[in-house]
Amino acid sequence: MPDPLGPLFDALESINNELTVFAGRLARLEDAVSVRGAGGSSGPDSEGAGDHVPGAPVLWHKLGDHERAALWSEFTAWVVRLADQYELTTEQLPHACWWEHGAVVAELTALWTAWESTYGTEQDGGAGPYLWHDAWARGIERIGRMWLGECTNGYHQQKSRTVWGTNIAYRKKILEAGPPGASADSKAA
C-alpha cells in the first residue's frame, strides 16, 4: 500500500530544494554587493549607491549628488586597486590626474561596469573573466592614447584644444546645416 503522506513529503522536499537554490542566489547577490562596497558603501542600504545595479552602465552626469558620490568612491577604489594589482605605469594611466581626463574616466567606467558584470555575479563564470581581461588590455592601451602622455611628469597639463560644447555659434551652424543628405527644404523648416 502506498504511503498516503508520500506526495506531501515529495512536495515539501521540492519546496525545500527551491528554497535552498533561492538562498544560494541571495547569498551570491549579497556577496556581489559586498564586493562593490570595497570603496566606501557596503551594500544596498548605503546612501545613494543602493539603486545602482552592479554592471549597469553609469552615466556620471545623470546621477544625483548622493549616488554620484557613493559610486565615485567605489569606482575610484576599484581603479586604484586595479592600478596596483596590474602594476600600471604612469605611461599607461596618469597617476596624478587620471580623473581629470574625461575620456579616461569614461573608459575606466566602462571597464568597471564590465568587471562588475563579470565578477559581481556567478551568472557567467565561463568566458566572462577571460573576455574582461581582453577588454582590460585593450582599454589600458586606448587610455594611453587618450591623454597622449601630457601628464607623465606628475602634474596635470590641460590639452590645448577648442572646447566644442560652449561655442553656441558653432552648434547653431551645425543645426542649420542639418543631417547628411537633408534637402534644402528640410533645412529651412
Image (cartoon, helix red, strand yellow):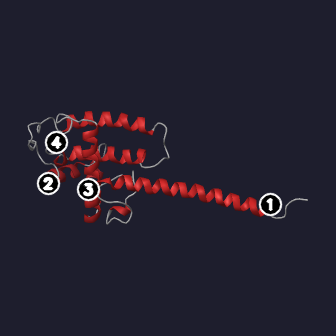
- Amino acid beneath label 3: Ser
Q: Quadrant of residue 60?
A: bottom left
Q: Quadrant of residue 128?
A: top left
Q: Which residue is mark 1?
A: 6
The answer to whether mark 1 and mark 3 are in CB contact below 8 A is no
Give me the C-alpha separation between circle 2 and circle 1. Answer: 75 Å
Q: Residues within 10 Å of mark 4 (few under 14, many from 20)?
A: some
Residue corresponding to mark 4? 95
Residue linked to disc 3:
73
Label of residue 166 in the image? 2
Q: Earlier in the sequence, mark 4 or mark 3?
A: 3
Of marks 2 and 4, the one in the foreground: 4
Q: Identify the secondary structure beneath mark 2.
A: loop
Residue type for callout 1 = Gly
Callout 2 touching callout 1 (CB < 8 Å):
no
Q: Is residue 181 above or below residue 28?
A: above
